[in-house]
Amino acid sequence: MGTEVRVEGLTKAFGKQMIWRDVSLTLPAGEISVMLGPSGTGKSVFLKTIIGLIKPDEGHVFIEGTDIATCSERELYDVRKLFGVLFQDGAMFGSMTLYDNVAFPLREHTRKNETEIREIVMEKMEMVGLAGAETKLPGEISGGMRKRAGLARALVLEPEILLIDEPDSGLDPVRTAYINQLFIDLNAQIEATFLIVTHDINTARTVPDNIGLLYHRHLAMFGPREMLLSSSEPVVSQFLNAQRQGPIGMSEEKDEDELAGESQYAMPALPPIPLQLAPSSGLLRRTQSPPGEWCRRNGVTPPPGSFASESAAAGLAVGAGGAA
């Protein structure tokens, strides 16, 4: 089962450059959350702050009662055992085989013998679709395979929190779709708390339970996927629907003249909210809500055409309840 991550009043600057100020949110235990934002808004810095690689100037990050921002090095070492991290490029050791790369955390941080290590490594490599590739070197495989190998390595210590930095970087749309499905299936299987940093709008619209948006040195919004996808807040609507019209410009923020020139035009209508990806099993994940539930509960009318296959998805929810 995943662990909740509670962030309160987080502020970080490098010298005179403010990255973000007063960021507060909670990553619910066992759910998939995505963090979005224009380039340079500090998404990867946020990821590194959560795991304690970067210390915030102000604020707190609570994990199982421990404040990552103020704890001792010993406490931080212990809390980090809850984490698995998939870095943007996979971060493979180029001179090691995929097997040895995946086995590395077990050899460094446990006292397991080689028989036990082999059993775990082979299980995780099979989970990410790399069975049979154990003897290959990172330079002999594709970028997508390197990311999956990095994911297998992130899983070997049975993490309760999985941090994933730009998993779609350098991947074509087909490979991105495969790795997104892999995240959904893994979450259904291990029920860890996922935080994915991405620029990919399709990923943000179809994968997570929750979405966050960093913009202009603050957290513009964080909440359930349907809340943000039905929001008419200009920054959120513009970014999640990949539109040019709105406050975000080429240099992050448009100037007054640009905004004045757009003021005569209405914001484009929100597109339909797509169904959230379901596990390959066809049953909803434990933390996955039926389509439209947040909108119904909060009296929000979703954009026309949303949840087009809702009747089919409702059948999945019933199936999930029966399976439980």
Image: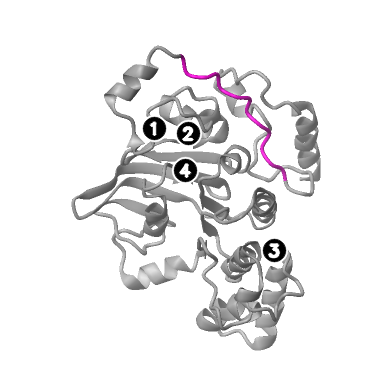
Disc nearer the start of the sequence (1/2): 2
- The reply to whether callout 2 and callout 4 are in contact (CB within 8 Å) is yes
Decide if residue 128 is on the left or right side of residue 32: right
Looking at the rendered image, the quarter that the N terminus falls into is bottom right
CA neighbours of label 1 inside 10 A, class few (<14), some (14 to 19), many (20+): many
Q: Residue at x 66, y 54 (%)?
A: 179
Q: Amino acid at mark 2?
A: Phe
- The reply to whether callout 4 and callout 3 are in contact (CB within 8 Å) is no
In this figure, which residue is indicated by the disc labeled 2? 239
In the picture, the disc for residue 149 is none
Name the one closer to the observer, 106 or 303.
303
In this figure, which residue is indicated by the disc labeled 1? 248
Tell me which corner region of the image, top left, top right, bottom left or bottom right, holds residue 150: bottom right
Disc nearer the start of the sequence (2/3): 3
- The reply to whether callout 1 and callout 2 are in contact (CB within 8 Å) is yes
How many callouts does the rendering have? 4
Residue 272 in magenta?
yes
- The reply to whether callout 4 and callout 1 are in contact (CB within 8 Å) is no
In this figure, which residue is indicated by the disc labeled 3? 128
Decide if residue 164 is on the left or right side of residue 322: left
Q: Residue furthest top?
A: 264
Q: Residue at x 39, y 32 (%)?
A: 248
Q: Secondary structure at mark 1?
A: strand
In this figure, which residue is indicated by the disc labeled 4? 36
